[in-house]
Amino acid sequence: MSAVSDPQHYLTSGWNLNNMPVLDASVLTHITADICGMKVPWLYVGMCFSSFCWHIEDHWSYSINYLHWGEPKTWYGAPGYAAEHLESVMKKLAPELFESQPDLLHQLVTIMNPNTLMNNGVPVICSVFTLI
């Protein structure tokens, strides 16, 4: 039986999202609570024409994403040094949203065209994930 088809391989793999936060080298091992989205993985399902909101990751941490099958997936992001500029542009273009919810970029609810951000001086990086 190959390692890929061996269920035991998956159960113990460091790439198993349930194992990743408790690996010896993971800083998350120091967190004792099961924090949803940090120590307990979430699953998002995307499809043709799906989109995802501009946001800041929980506790400003990293995220990991898998493309299991399907067509290439396009991601847009802004470098960390441009975070304040991105937020100020969004506040300028949608002030009413930030007035009612100052932590809007932590809520996964705001979409803005990447071209609009770039036209306002925000550096936006485009990355295309493909299966190989």
Image (cartoon, rainbow, N blue to C red):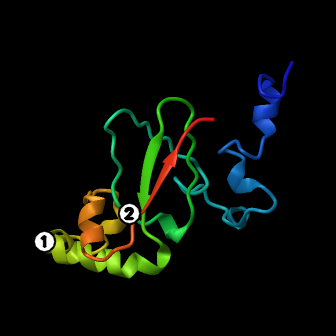
Residue 14 in the figure: left or right of residue 103: right
For the residue pair 115 and 104, the one nearer the viewer reads as 115
Could you tell me residue 67's position as x and y percent? 55, 38
- Could you say which quadrant of the image residue 38 lies in? bottom right
Name the residue furthest top. Answer: 1
Q: Is residue 99 visible?
A: no
Count how many numbered circles sit on residues in the image: 2
> Would you place residue 119 above or below residue 111 in this image?
below
Mark 2 packing: few (<14 Cα in 10 Å), some, or many (20+)?
A: some
Looking at the rendered image, the quarter that the N terminus falls into is top right
Q: Sequence-wise, which precedes: disc 2 or disc 1? A: 2
Could you tell me residue 43's position as x and y percent? 50, 41
Residue 40 in the figure: left or right of residue 51: right
Mark 1 packing: few (<14 Cα in 10 Å), some, or many (20+)?
A: few
Q: Amino acid at mark 2?
A: His
Mark 2 and mark 1: Cα distance apart in space: 17 Å
Could you tell me residue 60's position as x and y percent? 51, 70
- Could you say which quadrant of the image residue 83 lies in? bottom left
Looking at the rendered image, the quarter that the C terminus falls into is top right
Q: Amino acid at mark 1?
A: Glu
Classify mark 2: helix, strand or loop.
Answer: loop
From the image, tell me which residue sits under label 2: 55
Q: What residue is at 31 percent from the left and 37 percent from the top?
A: 49
Disc marking residue 21: none
- Could you say which quadrant of the image residue 7 lies in? top right
Classify mark 1: helix, strand or loop.
Answer: helix
Q: What residue is at 33 percent from the left and 55 percent from the top?
A: 53
From the image, tell me which residue sits under label 1: 96
Q: Is residue 125 visible?
A: yes
Q: What residue is at 27 percent from the left and 62 percent from the top?
A: 115
